Image: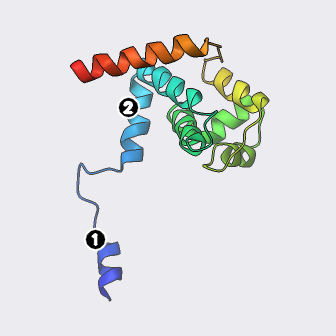
Amino acid sequence: MGRVEAEAAMKKPVGVGSYKEWEVQELRVDRDFAVEYLKVALESLDNPDERGGSLIMLRAVAEAYGGLGAVAAQAGISRESLYRALSPKGNPTLKTLVAVLKTLGLRLSVTEKQKAEAAQEKKSDDYAAA
């Protein structure tokens, strides 16, 4: 057995998980965190450089609240379509976003850009002061 095969055959250390596993678990157990996490994701959707990350964030929340298959079924979307829409190069329709959020017990809302930016700046200042 070669070195690569030997490394692949090694057992995963107890208590060690992936970041994705941790992220999904945190989103599952802390609903307020999940909501704030999605707010950040949705605010970034209009920036082409951040869109892929935002879609991955939405995907993580969907995974935390039942998995993509279950969310897709409840939203009336094929699983394959949801996987594509919530991929880094995805381009979900408004209908898809609304359906997924509704399935998660959430909805879209609109905030005036200047107020949102001022609130975000205040949060950043508060965080830096802490």
In the displayed structure, does residue 54 sit left or right of residue 78? Answer: left
> How would you rate the neighbour count of disc 2 (Cα within 10 Å): few for under 14, some for 14-19, many for 20 or more?
some
Query: Is residue 89 or residue 127 the one in the foreground?
Result: 127
The residue tagged 1 is 10
Query: Is residue 36 or residue 19 the one in the foreground?
Result: 36
Task: Tell me the element at label 2.
Answer: helix
Among the two numbered marks 1 and 2 on one chain, the one whose residue lies closer to the N terminus: 1
In the displayed structure, does residue 1 sit left or right of residue 66? Answer: left
Q: Quadrant of residue 22?
A: top left
Count of marks placed on residues: 2
Task: Tell me the element at label 1.
Answer: loop
Which residue is depicted at the point 55% across and 41% down? 50
Which residue is depicted at the point 72% across and 26% down? 99
Task: Give the number of the disc on residue 94.
Answer: none
Disc 1 + disc 2, Cβ < 8 Å: no
Quadrant holding the C terminus: top left
In the displayed structure, does residue 2 sit left or right of residue 105? Answer: left
Instruction: Give the image location of residue 123, x and y in percent.
Output: 37, 17
- Cα distance between the residues tagged 1 and 2: 27 Å
Q: Select label 1 or label 2 by which is in front.
A: 2
Instruction: Give the image location of residue 79, x and y in percent.
Output: 71, 45
Three-letter code, disc 1: Met
In the displayed structure, does residue 3 sit left or right of residue 106? Answer: left
Instruction: Give the image location of residue 109, x and y in percent.
Output: 64, 14
> How would you rate the neighbour count of disc 1 (Cα within 10 Å): few for under 14, some for 14-19, many for 20 or more?
few
Which residue is depicted at the point 65% across and 50% down? 89
The residue tagged 2 is 26
Query: Is residue 57 or residue 18 the one in the foreground?
Result: 57
Residue 32 in the image: above or below residue 87: above
Three-letter code, disc 2: Glu
Instruction: Give the image location of residue 19, x and y in percent.
Output: 36, 46
Which residue is depicted at the point 30% across and 75% down? 7
